[in-house]
Image (tube, rainbow, N blue to C red):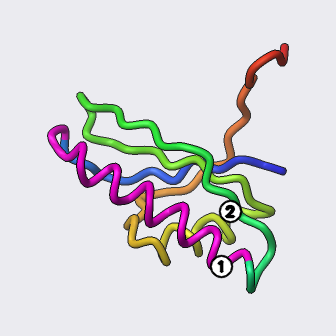
Amino acid sequence: MPSYLVETYLRRGDVGERAARNRRARSAAEELTQERPCVRFDRSIHVLDDEICFYVFEAQSAQEAAHVAQHAGLDPIRIVEAISSGKGKK
């Protein structure tokens, strides 16, 4: 299944907010998967110096990832497909 990066703004000192957003992203993905194609929240990456936080979702399409991100209140700036080498892959 493809992975998508959901780019959001997150201030450097908002570590607690990132944890809350992670919980909302996971809950939204689980909740909406009952109604729609499967979307799985994988992880977040907070780039402190740039005040950007990326949320990684596995989804059938960018639209599905966007729907979950909006439902979770992440206020996405943009959503792009991403390819990861992953563990053990070359």
Q: Earlier in the sequence, mark 1 or mark 2?
A: 1
Q: Residue at x 27, y 34 (%)?
A: 50
Q: Which residues are magenta?
A: 12-33
Q: Residue at x 74, y 86 (%)?
A: 35
Image quadrant in which you'd find residue 72: bottom left
The amino acid marked with disc number 1 is Leu
Position of residue 43 in the picture relative to residue 74 (left or right): right
Residue 2 or residue 77, whichever sits in front: 2
Image quadrant in which you'd find residue 88: top right
Residue linked to disc 1: 32
Q: Residue at x 45, y 50 (%)?
A: 7
**Residue 4 pos. (x, y %):** 65, 50
Residue linked to disc 2: 62
Q: Helix, strand or loop at disc 1?
A: helix
Q: Residue at x 74, y 59 (%)?
A: 59
**Residue 14 pos. (x, y %):** 19, 46
Most extreme residue toward the left is 13
Residue 84 or residue 32, whichever sits in front: 32
Position of residue 48 in the picture relative to residue 7 (left or right): left
**Residue 65 pos. (x, y %):** 63, 64
Please tell me whether residue 21 belongs to the stretch shown in magenta: yes
Q: Quadrant of the C terminus?
A: top right
Q: Nearer the viewer, mark 1 or mark 2?
A: 1
What distance separates the C-alpha of mark 1 from that of mark 2? 15 Å
Please tell me whether residue 14 belongs to the stretch shown in magenta: yes
**Residue 86 pos. (x, y %):** 74, 25
The amino acid marked with disc number 2 is Ala
Position of residue 53 in the picture relative to residue 13 (left or right): right
Q: Helix, strand or loop at disc 2?
A: helix
Magenta span dominant secondary structure:
helix
Q: Which mark is residue 52?
A: none
